[in-house]
Amino acid sequence: MENQSVYTEESNNPLDRVEELLDDNNWVYNRMNSDELVVRVSGKACDYRLLFVWQEHMGALQFCCQYEMAIHKNNMPLTSAVVMDINNALWMGHFEVEKESRSPSFRQTCLVRGRKDA
């Protein structure tokens, strides 16, 4: 599968830099539009789905890493406690477990207002 980008206009969109990084590492990605980019990465324990969303009006870049695995329903109480402990120790971003799919993910938003591109 080849990398797909439907957005080619020169801009200050931070997803353009993400695209460059992905190209440099030969990672397969899909740029659905100017504001969304998805990457699938295979890992040892599971596969990962990385989602980048640029919200220009807010000057915010959202990042989400979804772990393509499900926590067994009997382990959900322990998982919830562990996720809460981890989140308490994080300075930025947070982990969560989607209730219905029981799939963990990490989310973070970076404010990039006022940045100057070189």
Image (tube, grey):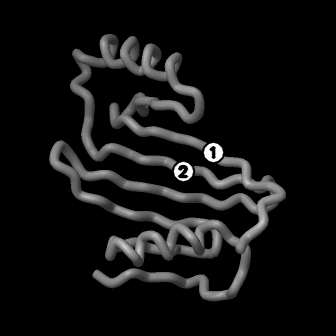
Q: Which residue is mark 1?
A: 109
Give the quadrant of residue 3.
Answer: bottom left
The extreme left residue here reads 44
Task: Pick the quarter of the image with the N terminus.
Answer: bottom left
Picture residue at 49% right of the left edge, 48% below the top = 64
Give the quadrant of residue 74.
Answer: top left
- 80 or 88: which is nearer to us? 88
Circle 1 crowding by C-alpha within 10 Å: few under 14, some 14–19, many from 20: some
Counting every numbered tag in the picture gives: 2
Give the quadrant of residue 16.
Answer: bottom right
Residue 30 position in % (x across, y down): 44, 73
Q: Are marks 2 and 1 in contact (CB under 8 Å)?
A: yes
Q: CA distance from mark 2 to mark 1?
A: 6 Å
Asked which secondary structure carries label 1, the reply is strand
Does residue 18 appear to the left or right of 43 in the view shown?
right
Picture residue at 31% right of the left edge, 12% below the top = 78
The extreme front residue here reads 118
Q: As shown in the figure, which amino acid type bears the numbered disc 1?
A: Thr
Residue 100 in the image: above or below residue 75: below
Q: As shown in the figure, which amino acid type bears the numbered disc 2?
A: Phe
Picture residue at 32% right of the left edge, 52% below the top = 48
Asked which secondary structure carries label 2, the reply is strand
Residue 24 position in % (x across, y down): 39, 76
Does residue 44 appear to the left or right of 53 in the view shown?
left
Picture residue at 60% right of the left edge, 83% below the top = 7
Q: Earlier in the sequence, mark 2 or mark 1?
A: 2
Residue 117 position in % (x across, y down): 73, 70
Q: Which residue is mark 2?
A: 63
Residue 53 position in % (x across, y down): 60, 59
Q: Residue 32: which disc?
A: none
Task: Pick the quarter of the image with the C terminus.
Answer: bottom right
